[in-house]
């Protein structure tokens, strides 16, 4: 904005409205030059903004990207980040629980980049003992150690021209982390037992399912390496937080395994579908995929039943401390009762502890349990007959109920 009636208020207002700078008349050479100097940078910024807008529009509504399936907001923003970073050389760190698709994201970054014609070289840093990992990363010269009769290029050299994927990077021994950082910064590697520095042209993508803050504060992942790897960070949320994706993925896996196994399975029985939507999927997409593979193989009709997918003893175990509250079919009173009873069961029948954990009074806990006993224990998620005996004792006025000592 150029003005002849300058005031601080006006300047602030102009910048708020989107002006980049504020220049007062008269336009002398010094001011004009300052203006001119800004123009190229501003044009670049504008082009970037436009490109982002265009990308956002193009990626909205997507249900697939590369080998990834997902239509949740979270996955769509992952697609956007992949799209934006793939053509840069920036290092990317992918975070997320096991089975959330970190490797697929790494592959997508490679495939969408100009390096797609080069190699995608993946190395799992947790799977190998320290010495072997070092050898895999940097390679060795002939005679570098006893038994090394051949020279061997390492992952850095093998991935040159393409993408190096370092999986489970936080598990790497710290002295190798130092060497890795050096190689990343200099873009040069020296093989074990070698003298010459070999230039490498790589893009590094790394992944970890560890809690980063913890790995950093406990010194397992060096901070300098972290900053070098995480120029861009991509976080994949757990599947249980992506209800839209569960539905889409389940249907696709069903179709995939049905055709792979030549079976005419086309849908889910109600119990199976309810379970898929309410289960917490601690193993994320990998677990869902495996459950559906098993479901298709075991099914005998056109629909997968719950028992086809899940063995009985596994059905509740991972969820034993979780509550399922079907919205639209549950009253607050019912949900409250379920919570108290489930807490009671997981507190080993300790009424006082249950009250504390669930944030209700001991009397409230007792009332819910007595109500349960009156209904004959038909309320699911409730305590067993064994706890029933203990409650009765408690309501007789004895000491707080305690479970029998565990053997
Ligand atoms: N969004 C997705 N769409 C389709 N398949 C997926 C998706 N996410 C994960 N998968 C599948 O789930 C399995 C696990 O994915 P992947 O190996 O990428 O997970 P990860 O995050 O690397 O797990 P880990 O930390 O255990 O190595 C693979 O078979 C993969 O194909
Ligand atoms: Mg992985």
Image: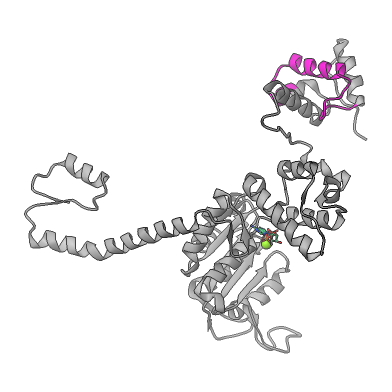
Q: Is residue 42 left or right of residue 87?
A: left
> Is residue 367 within the magenta segment?
yes
* The quarter of the displayed image where residue 334 is located: top right
In front: 50, or 12? 50
Q: Is residue 54 left or right of residue 138?
A: left
Q: Residue at x 70, y 28 (%)?
A: 329
Residue 169 visible somewhere in the drawing: no
* The quarter of the displayed image where residue 374 is located: top right
* The quarter of the displayed image where residue 356 is located: top right
Tell me where the magenta segment starts and ends, as one range: 355-384
Image x and y of residue 228, in percent: 51, 63
In front: 45, or 161? 45
Image x and y of residue 379, in percent: 83, 25
The quadrant where ligand 1 appears is bottom right
Q: Residue at x 31, y 60 (%)?
A: 46
Q: Quadrant of the C terminus?
A: top right
Vertical arrangement, residue 170 with respect to residue 401, above or below: below
In front: 187, or 359? 359
Image x and y of residue 233, in percent: 53, 57
Q: Is residue 261 left or right of residue 144?
A: right
Residue 58 visible somewhere in the drawing: yes
Q: Residue at x 82, y 16 (%)?
A: 371
Q: Residue at x 49, y 57 (%)?
A: 59
Image x and y of residue 268, in percent: 77, 48
Q: Is residue 65 left or right of residue 345?
A: left
In front: 281, or 213? 281
* Numbered disc total: 0
> Is residue 216 within the magenta segment?
no
Vertical arrangement, residue 13 with respect to residue 264, above or below: above
């Amino acid at each position: 904005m150029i003005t002849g009636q300058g005031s601080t208020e006006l300047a602030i207002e102009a910048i708020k409205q989107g002006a980049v700078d504020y220049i007062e008349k008269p336009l002398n050479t010094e001011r004009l030059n300052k203006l001119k100097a800004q123009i190229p940078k501003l044009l670049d910024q504008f082009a970037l903004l436009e490109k982002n807008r265009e990308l956002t529009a193009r990626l909205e509504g997507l249900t697939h990207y590369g080998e990834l399936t997902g239509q949740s907001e979270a996955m769509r923003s992952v697609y956007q980040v992949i799209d934006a970073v793939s053509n840069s050389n920036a290092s990317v760190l992918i975070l997320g629980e096991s089975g959330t698709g970190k490797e697929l994201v790494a592959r997508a970054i490679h495939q969408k980049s100009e390096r797609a014609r080069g190699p995608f070289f993946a190395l799992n840093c947790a799977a190998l003992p320290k010495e072997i990992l070092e050898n895999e990363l940097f390679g060795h010269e002939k005679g570098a150690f006893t038994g090394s009769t051949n020279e061997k290029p390492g992952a850095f050299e093998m991935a040159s021209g393409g993408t190096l994927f370092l999986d489970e990077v936080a598990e790497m021994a710290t002295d190798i982390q130092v060497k890795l950082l050096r190689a990343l910064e200099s873009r040069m590697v020296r093989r074990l037992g070698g003298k010459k520095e070999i230039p490498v042209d790589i893009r590094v993508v790394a992944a970890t399912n560890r809690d980063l803050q913890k790995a950093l504060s406990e010194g397992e992942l060096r901070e300098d390496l972290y900053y070098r790897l995480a120029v861009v960070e991509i976080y994949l949320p757990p599947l249980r937080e992506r209800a839209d994706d569960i539905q889409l993925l389940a249907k696709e896996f069903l179709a995939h395994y049905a055709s792979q196994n030549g079976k005419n399975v086309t849908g889910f029985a109600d119990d199976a579908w309810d379970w898929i939507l309410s289960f917490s999927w601690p193993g994320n997409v990998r677990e869902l995929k495996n459950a559906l593979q098993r479901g298709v193989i075991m099914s005998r009709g056109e629909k997968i039943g719950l028992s086809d997918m899940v063995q009985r003893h596994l059905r509740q175990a991972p969820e034993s401390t979780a509550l399922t509250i079907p919205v639209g079919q549950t009253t607050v009173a019912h949900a409250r009762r379920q919570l108290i009873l489930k807490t009671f069961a997981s507190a080993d029948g300790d009424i006082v502890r249950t009250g504390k954990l669930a944030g209700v009074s001991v009397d409230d806990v007792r009332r819910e349990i007595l109500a349960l006993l009156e209904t004959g224990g038909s309320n699911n998620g409730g305590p067993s007959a064994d706890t029933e005996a203990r409650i009765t004792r408690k309501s007789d006025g004895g000491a707080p109920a305690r479970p029998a000592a565990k053997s």
